[in-house]
């Protein structure tokens, strides 16, 4: 047999009974928010401190272009 219920599907509504105040729940939520990160794992950029001299690197790149080790300009 079929059974009828309210049109708003209230038979599926979850009922909670609690004796906690809104302030207690808010304080707990604030504590949890401080211990959890919403930042995706691996999204931080790793910084690297170079010890190379800028002029030396530019000179090496220019030499590599002259000797044909690397290309220069745009190629389509």
Image (cartoon, helix red, strand yellow):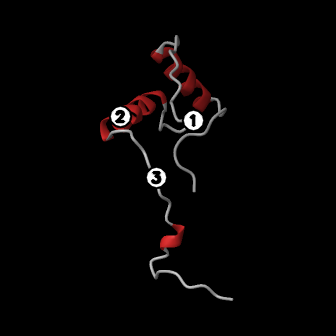
Is residue 51 positioned above or below 10 on the image? above
Q: Which residue is mark 3?
A: 16
- Reading the chain from its start, which is encountered first: label 1 or label 2? 2
> Is residue 34 or residue 9 the one in the foreground?
9
- Reading the chain from its start, which is encountered first: label 3 or label 2? 3
Q: Residues within 10 Å of mark 2 (few under 14, many from 20)?
A: few
Distance in Å between CA atoms under marks 1 and 3? 35 Å
Q: Secondary structure at mark 1?
A: loop
Q: Give the number of the mark in front: 1 or 3.
A: 3
- Reading the chain from its start, which is encountered first: label 1 or label 3? 3
Q: Residue at x 57, y 34 (%)?
A: 42
Is residue 12 positioned above or below 71 on the image? below
> Is residue 58 or residue 49 the one in the foreground?
49
Q: Which residue is mark 2?
A: 24
Q: Residue at x 52, y 81 (%)?
A: 5
Is there CB contact under 8 Å for labels 1 and 2? no
Distance in Å between CA atoms under marks 1 and 2? 30 Å
Is there CB contact under 8 Å for labels 3 and 2? no
Is residue 22 positioned above or below 9 on the image? above
């Amino acid at each position: 047999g079929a059974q009828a219920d309210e049109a708003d599907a209230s038979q599926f509504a979850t009922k909670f009974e609690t004796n906690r105040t809104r302030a207690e729940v808010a304080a707990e939520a604030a504590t949890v928010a401080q211990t959890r990160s919403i930042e995706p794992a691996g999204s931080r950029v790793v910084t690297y401190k170079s010890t190379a001299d800028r002029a030396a690197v530019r000179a090496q790149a220019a030499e590599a272009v002259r000797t044909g080790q690397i290309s220069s300009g745009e190629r389509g």
